[in-house]
Amino acid sequence: MKRAKQLWGVVFLLLAMSTQAFGAVEINGIYYNLVEKAKVAEVTSGDTKYTGDVVVPKTVVYENVTYNVTSIGASAFYWCGNLTSVGIPNSVTSIGKNAFYGCSGLTNITIPNSVTSIGGYAFNGCSALTSFVIPNSVTSIGSYAFSGCSITSINIPSSMTYIENYAFSGCSSLTSITIPSSVINIGTAAFQECSGLTSITIPSSVSIIGYSAFSGCSGLRSVSIPSSVTYIDANVFYGCTNLKSVTIGNKIQTLYNGVFGNCPELTDVYCLAENPPIVNSTTFQNSYIGYVTLHVPAVSMNSYRSAAIWQDFKEIVSIEDGSTSPIEVTDVESLTDAIFTAEAKGNPGSETTLTVSMKNTQEAGGYSFDLLLPEGVALAKDNDGDYIYELSDRHNRHSETVNYQEATDVYSFAVLSLEGKAIRGSNGPIWTIRLKVDDTMLEGDYAVKIQNAKYSVTNGSSKVALPEVTGRISIETYQKGDANGDGDVDIADAVCVVNHVVGKEMPAFIEKAADTNGDNDVDIADAVRIVNYVVGRIDALARSQESRNESRRANISEESDAIYAADINIAAGGEAMLTVSLKNAQVTSGYSFDLKLPEGVTIAKDNDGDYIYNLSDRHKGHSATLNYRASTGVYSFAVLSLQSKELTGNDGAVCSFKLKVAGGVRAGDYTVNITNAKYSLTSGASKVTMPETAAKLTVTGAQGDDMSTRGDLNNDGNVDMVDVTKLIDYIIGKTQ
């Protein structure tokens, strides 16, 4: 009896399985795996190899049941050498591993937008496949997916972030490939032996380039590694035998074995890193660097000349030398009518000004021109997104407009007077324009062009067409500490940094130069370091250690470092002093923080309009500055010592502010927040970043002259019988 039950169990299990899936079944010459429960079909292999042209339908019918074809299964067309073309329906979402492996006769296949994944080795060895479109729906491509294909160009969809290992290796006919800005990682040997590639653009989104990614790409002539790349594995460009020029971004710290090995045609290497990357004897092996010119930042030339391997290059020159072609500036003196620019200077990662002038032999009522700037330079914008510029006093009730034309990459300017007013004078400045220089720009001279310029005579009856004029902007190396860009590092730069820290607008400010300790943050520590350099306490404005602590809400008793305020009570319409204290586990000579007050509460001012605050006796020869940032609604406060005096003690009051509460502020508890708090070590070499802290501000007493709410004893916004009852209870002693 027991054995019979076991047999029946096996029968029922087999019956159940038969309702879920079948073995491969052939329908109209194509084999499928069918899943009855889900009503889906997967194309698979069968007893007979596929040949010729195959068209896969969206649905198939088997035993009166309709199935949706949703996938091309693993090894479905494996090694079908006589297969010539395949049509895939838009019901298919995946192409499995080895799906078309070794289909050497396949010349045509269309992948629909429904496909999201292409498995490893899917088209490996499809040597007759010369064109292939990867739809934007694809988010993943497996390793070796197109290895050994004869495709000539490929566009990787913007839906992908990672190019898998060996994905396009051995595609020797590949001459063009587009890598979108969504890609952050190029995998091992992804384009190995793609000998037909003559150029490759690595987008600035990429941070990692894997082992041997472009090795054996013998057709490559030049390559530029963007500053977004932080890691390049070994042998990445090994055997690129026609590679002549290489640019290495400024984030690379190490170049591993054979990265540029066996590149015998190399003539120029541009390395943008200020500190020479670590290299070894194989990094440039067999690339004959004794005949190669190394271009480096001017401030780093001595470092490269003394660094192992780097010092073996034929010559080491600054990037400024020969990095850009000489600019043929137009001789404006020879022109009678012209709109032209003065020579401008800028620093990478900073802002500068460009002056535009006009010479006009006739009385001009209005004018227009296009401004073409070099790549990496743009018109600066304010917080509202408006371009920053000023019209000169040559204008008299004139109106202006500025527009960027993306199609032609120019800024178009136009000025006119609706009242027919004339431009004053016949020669002189008309615009002062704020420019923003990208931090990736190389030092050198660049062209600034005025095009399509014309002015109208006052009555508008005619116009004067003006010649194209070329000016120059010189991008110069900044000096560490020269925050205001005047060529010197002095006390004015320390003041400039402090003003920046508290949010005061500076006419000239070079952020990279101001970051004297190299922690990518301009703060009070940088100002302290400039002071120490100016007075000779330190010999160089070097890089810092990492700052401590990340911003977070603090429990003061548990913190070793914090700036915090004491709780305070203030009557509505009144004033009181808010005390702020500093806990510092290390010795400090300066600090800064932002103070966020509740609505209706401000820092009081004296009769001269200056904020009222005091420094405690923990300070010795320290100076302070306070600024209100209207855009963020915070007060920024900074303190430093020009003598690098240290604050006494390691816990206690450092400053106090007189707060003023508006008369209409309702009684109750409010929060005072201290954010963005930091203190500098005495040397300025590093800083301590402190957590956000909060204090309680209690508003008490009558609410100004608003008689309608004076009797609101329970603070519900109404004066009613509940308040009367509360008052009677107090009088007769029921409540305190």
Image (cartoon, rainbow, N blue to C red):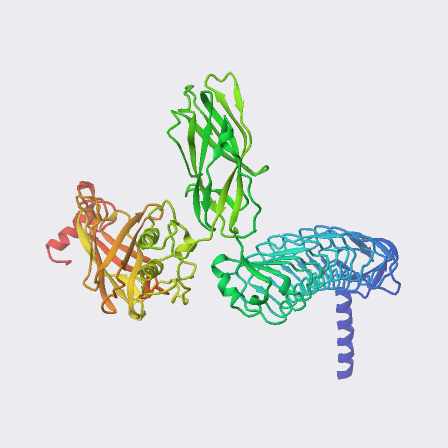
Instruction: Find the residue positioned furthest to the bottom.
Output: 2
**Residue 64 visible here:** no
Q: Is residue 607 above or below residue 191?
A: above
560, 295: nearer the viewer: 295
Q: Position of residue 431 (x, y in %)?
A: 43, 33
Count of labels in the image: 0
Tell me which residue sits at (64%, 62%) in the image. 291
The image shows residue 689, relative to residue 363, as above or below, that is below
Q: Residue furthest left?
A: 732
- The x, y position of residue 572, in whole percent, is 19, 48
Q: Quadrant of residue 229?
A: bottom right
Q: Quadrant of residue 36?
A: bottom right
Q: Quadrant of residue 18?
A: bottom right
Rendered location of residue 287, percent (x, y): 66, 65
In what quadrant of the picture does the N terminus appear?
A: bottom right
Residue closest to the eye, 613 or 674? 613
Residue 426 in view of the camera: yes
- Horizontal side of 482 relative to 658 (left or right) equals right
Q: Nearer the viewer, residue 100 or 230?
A: 230
Taking the image as shown, residue 166 lies to the left or right of residue 736, namely right
Q: Position of residue 220 (x, y in %)?
A: 69, 57
Residue at the spot x=81%, y=59% of the render? Answer: 126
Q: Which quadrant of the figure contains the C terminus? A: bottom left
Instruction: Say if 22 sits above or below 368 in the image.
Output: below
Q: Residue at x 79, y 56 (%)?
A: 150
